[in-house]
Amino acid sequence: MSLLLESIKVEQGHICNLEYHQARVTRSSRAIFNMDGIDLNEIFRLNECPENGTYKCRLIYDQQLRSIEYLPYVKRTIAQSLMVDAFDFTYPHKYLDRTFFDDLKIRFPQFDEIILYKDGLITDSCFSNLAFYDGTSWFTPENPLLPGTKRQQLLDQGKIQLAKININDLQQFQQVSFINAMLNLGESSLPITSII
């Protein structure tokens, strides 16, 4: 069976966005294991969180929790990104096996991040969902490889909108924001001119 991964932000002892992470865990567990999956509230009740600082809580699970660890979080600096065709690659669940993404980073070490597209439409980066700013509003690709928890929260809050974003339409935007469990909208951004 496949091992799954869930990365959750813990800030000053507060577990962030827990309901969205639980929804993804449940969705993946039902699809893969035909069960509701692990109960994140119960796991955090039994595993004390660090009280000071920002941490990435890394949960590995299948039908049960296999490991939990808290890693001090350091935000990555992204200065340049490369667009790469993902072809027929699919990543509908947050699997522990990230060989496809790791191989891309090995192939293109001169770039800080890889932005993926399929059939000419932008999907995600190797480590995050994306949001594009046109000077007025933020838009996120309609069909990401993996619908993220932060992306869903931002959609529910009306802070980002769904759009089909073609690789040829990039110049309509000013910047791209990398969004994931650890990064909020605008927290890690790159000018469109820095995407190759």
Image: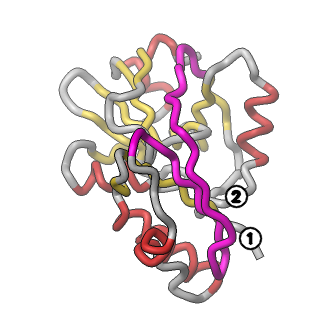
Quarter of the image with the N terminus in it? bottom right
* Residue 108 image offset from top left, x and y in percent: 75, 23
35 up-or-down from 28: above or below: below
The image quarter in which residue 92 lies: bottom right
* Residue 24 image offset from top left, x and y in percent: 47, 68
State the scheme by which the image is colored. secondary structure
Q: Amino acid at mark 1?
A: Ser
* Residue for badge 1: 2
The image quarter in which residue 2 lies: bottom right
* Residue for badge 2: 96
Q: Which mark is residue 150?
A: none
Instruction: Confirm whether the magenta stretch covers residue 9.
Output: no
92 up-or-down from 14: above or below: below
* Residue 188 image offset from top left, x and y in percent: 41, 26
Residue drawn at (45%, 68%) of the image: 44
The image quarter in which residue 97 lies: bottom right
Tag 1 near tag 2, CB within 8 Å: yes
* Residue 136 image offset from top left, x and y in percent: 18, 26
The magenta-colored residue range is 52-81
